Image: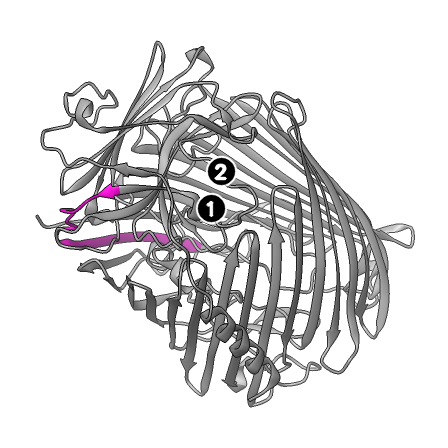
Amino acid sequence: MNFRAFAVLFVVAFLSSQISYADQKTIIDVPTLSGDVVIDGVPDEDFWSQARTIELIYETQPADNAPAAVKTTAYIADNGREVLLAFRAEDPDPSKIRAFLRDRDSLWSDDFVGFTIDTFNDQRRAYEFYVNPLGAQGDLIIDGATGNEDDSWDGLWDSAAKINATGYTVEIRIPYSTLRFQQTNGVVQKWGVDFLRFRPRDNRYRISNNRLIRGDNCYLCGLSKLQGFANANPGRDLEVTPTFTAGYAQSRDEPNLAWQSDGAQYELGVDVKWGIGSNLTLNGTINPDFSQVESDQAQLDLNTTFALFFPEKRPFFLEGADYFSTPFNVVYTRSVQDPDYGIRATGRNGKHTYGFFAAQDSVTQVLLPTALGSGFSPRLEQESLAAAGRYRFDINSKTSIGLISTLRSGNDYQNTVIGIDGRWQTQGHTITAQWLTSDTENPTAFNPKPPEPPLPKKQQGDAFSLGYEFSNRNWGAYVSHTSYDEGFRADLGFINQVDNKQSVIGGSRTWHGEDGAKITRMQLRGDWDITHRSDGQLLERELEAYFSLNGPMQSFIRAGAVKRDRFWAGQLFDESWWSMYGEITPTSRLSFSLFLRAGEQIDYRNAKLADIVQIDPSITLNIGRGINFRLNHTYQKLSRDGGNVFVANLSDARLSWQFDHRQRLRLSLQYGNTIRDRFLYNFPLNYNDEVRDLSAQLLYSYKINPRTAFYAGYSEGQFSNDDYPELFATGRALFMKLSYAWQPE
């Protein structure tokens, strides 16, 4: 056994020796009630007078568990089929309530109320449900170990809200079939809970029924406990969602050529979700529509050696994605591009958490990493199998160990990864470790074009990580070491650099303003890292430091500097730059942000040091109750030897009109313009001096719930270069999608 595997096993053995301690949190008894509740946003039924009442009395941000300035009351009850909640959020000046009609999971800048609920009471994973004063919904999954929140999960639940003369009220109904929990058949259960209100004004105030524990990085460990739910029944958790898609697309390469098309395309598919008891959920999909309904936000990649990362948006892969999370990103489902079918199983039984998925992809394309960069292989029109399995054992609320394995397999091609990992955290301290080993058989079709050398027929290698982090209210520190063998590959993941060993050490100091202070928070942080190739060659040595503060009008400012030695094209370059980022929300209808960067950076195409300038402004504007406009722009200029290697501009504008909670019309425009100076390149430039492209999408959506929806849209792409100086349409398409989530009684 190699040293890295032994180190992880040692850490795992240490973690497994840790023991838990008794739970001493506040107990909230939840009554089981009968009676009808109309979810209309007005909790005026007699039912609510019998529900358990909870006062949200603490302002936990920006103040440190100070008395809340406004009164908020929550109500909760159980009827055996659903958990029912209501909120009364009082406000001394209701005219200042910030609320807009929003698409799902877009309410985070508004006033809103809701709760966090840990249904397994194990501090590992919890649901979050929120509603703004106009009834817009947001739901998330929070990872107890990392604190990361994932809004890609969409549950089926009902809510409504009303603004009144004293503030606003909210009602929420969550069927038990939406939740996962340990069904106990008549035995009283305990669930973790945090009732919350967010009130953005000059600052963004967080109000809770719980004190926020400072110096403990486990948020879920500090929750109160709901006691009850003895008769909670998830019911028949079966959902069948047939899908119909239709599209018509045309393309051409030159403006004077006729449009080409394969004609109208129609597809039928079906998704099935089956909750087998409380411990296991099965999902299956046949002939799914895996197109991106809404386009990705554009990114510039003009002077980088690494592949760009794009987030997953497809529902089949999003649900239960957190079950496959490990320190290394070995499951990146965007690599599965066009599957014909897929299956997934996820579940939890006591201390055991498990997940599995498999999909048959109609194409094969993988990320090929090296020590100095990464890129995607040629796209092969051949099928491949993509599969991943994950198991985690929670020794106690602080300690877990896990196993993971992934597979990509096609014609004369295969990549397998297996590994072990562990995590321990308590009172601000966190230790993580992971070891992976991979085995790859490459097809000839993956070989790069000459003069690049061909890939070895077989590749093998390991990856290893060990990290420690400490954080409390005022101080933070972290140290980590990661290494990748040259032959390591994780073709189902997103690991874009191998053949290196990196060590990092860093820390931070945070100052908090007194209650009522204009400056609520300041922080100084920095780190130093060093990276070597496996043969000992120094790849990178970097020192960076940043200072940030939070101030009035929800403002945030961060300024910092980076000094880095980086190896490229056989030599070390001395890079350095400064950067600044700021954002501010002067009113509920307007917010700005701006990122600036300037300094010296490698011109990778020509292996020379150059001057870099980057400016990224952004503006968000809310018009009326339902119209939202957002504009992001990126400007980059790389200069040397008295000229500009390139000047690039990229704009992403999105105008959304939310008619009501179900209907939305959205216009997206992305425009890019790049100008290059061919005389500053060390080789014949295959690019044009100037390239422009414009893409547009108009999308109408009608959503009854996240899985019963209708979409219709039109998209068009335009292009110009030196040969065709005027923009001309290169592609256009009409598309429609209809899905219906059927749940038998």
- Image marks 2 and 1: residues in contact by CB distance under 8 Å: yes
Judging from the image, what secondary structure is the residue with disc 1 in? helix
Question: Could you tell whether 447 is left or right of 566 in the image?
Answer: left
As for residue 237 lying within the magenta part, the answer is yes
Q: Which segment is the magenta one?
A: 227-250
Tell me, yes or no, whether the highlighted magenta stretch contains residue 491. no
Task: Tell me the chief SS of the magenta region.
Answer: strand
Neighbourhood count class around disc 2 (C-alpha, 10 Å): few under 14, some 14–19, many 20 upward: some
Rendering coords of residue 676 (x, y %): 76, 53
Residue shown at the point (50%, 54%) measured from the top left = 146
Mark 2 secondary-structure assignment:
loop
Tell me: residue 323, above or below residue 553. below
On residue 219, the disc is 1
* Residue under label 2: 212
Residue 59 to residue 687: above or below? above
Apparent side of residue 662 relative to residue 20 in the rendered image (left or right): left
Residue found at x 38% / y 29%: 113
- The amino acid type of the residue labelled 1 equals Tyr
